[in-house]
Image (spheres, rainbow, N blue to C red):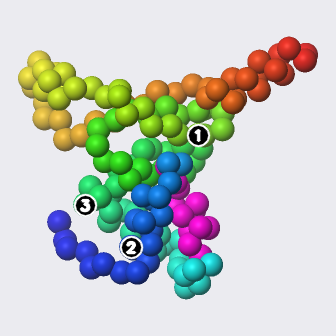
Amino acid sequence: MAIVRRSKKRDAILRLIRSTKCHPSADWIYQQLKDDYPNLSLGTVYRNLNQLSEQHIIRRVGVINGQERFDADTYPHAHFVCNCCGAVMDLPDYAPSRQYVQSLSEQYEFIVEGHEFNLRGLCKDCKNLITLEETVS
């Protein structure tokens, strides 16, 4: 893995990701930082997100509504993803244990290099909105 030099933009991207629980996309990060860094490009944001992810400083949550989302919390945990609005919520107490992953690895004779655990469905707000719409109809 190549050593990546620090930069003001890279530090700002990382600081922003660490300051939010919204699991941001590259576009969201770009929109938040462009006023403070007028020569920031979306390509620079993507490049830095890829480097931070490859160095395990941040993690990828997955593609949600067509955009890759990121998380500053690299400790193993699950996420809930709303299929309606795209909200991502941390579920810190829910992740497969190391023992479970190890037993699967031994049982099926593979090497686990990482894992994600995501639940999908409707968040409380979207569920309530759909219930309200059904009641009105």
Which quadrant would residue 106 be assigned to in this image? Answer: top left
Whether 12 is drawn above or below 135: the answer is below
Residue carrying label 3:
55
- Residue 105 on the magenta span: no
**Circle 3: element type:** loop
Residue carrying label 2:
11
Q: Is residue 91 left or right of residue 64?
A: left
Location of the N terminus (image quadrant) = bottom left
Q: Position of residue 30 (x, y in %)?
A: 56, 68
Precedes in sequence: disc 3 or disc 2: 2
Whether 27 is drawn above or below 66: the answer is below
Which quadrant would residue 8 be assigned to in this image? Answer: bottom left
Disc 1 to disc 2, how far (Cα)?
25 Å
Q: Position of residue 97 (x, y in %)?
A: 22, 26
Residue carrying label 1:
87
Q: Position of residue 131 (x, y in %)?
A: 77, 18
Q: Amino acid at mark 3?
A: Gln
Disc 3 to disc 2, how far (Cα)?
14 Å
Question: Magenta segment range?
Answer: 23-34
Q: Indicate which disc residue 67 carries.
A: none
Location of the C terminus (image quadrant) = top right
Kindly check if marks 1 and 3 are in contact, taking CB atoms under 8 A apart as contact: no
Q: Nearer the viewer, mark 3 or mark 2?
A: 2
User: Are there few (<14), some (14-19), or many (20+) residues within 10 Å of tag 3?
Assistant: some
Q: Residue at x 83, y 16 (%)?
A: 134
Kindly check if marks 3 and 2 are in contact, taking CB atoms under 8 A apart as contact: no
Whether 82 is drawn above or below 38: the answer is above
Q: Residue at x 44, y 52 (%)?
A: 70
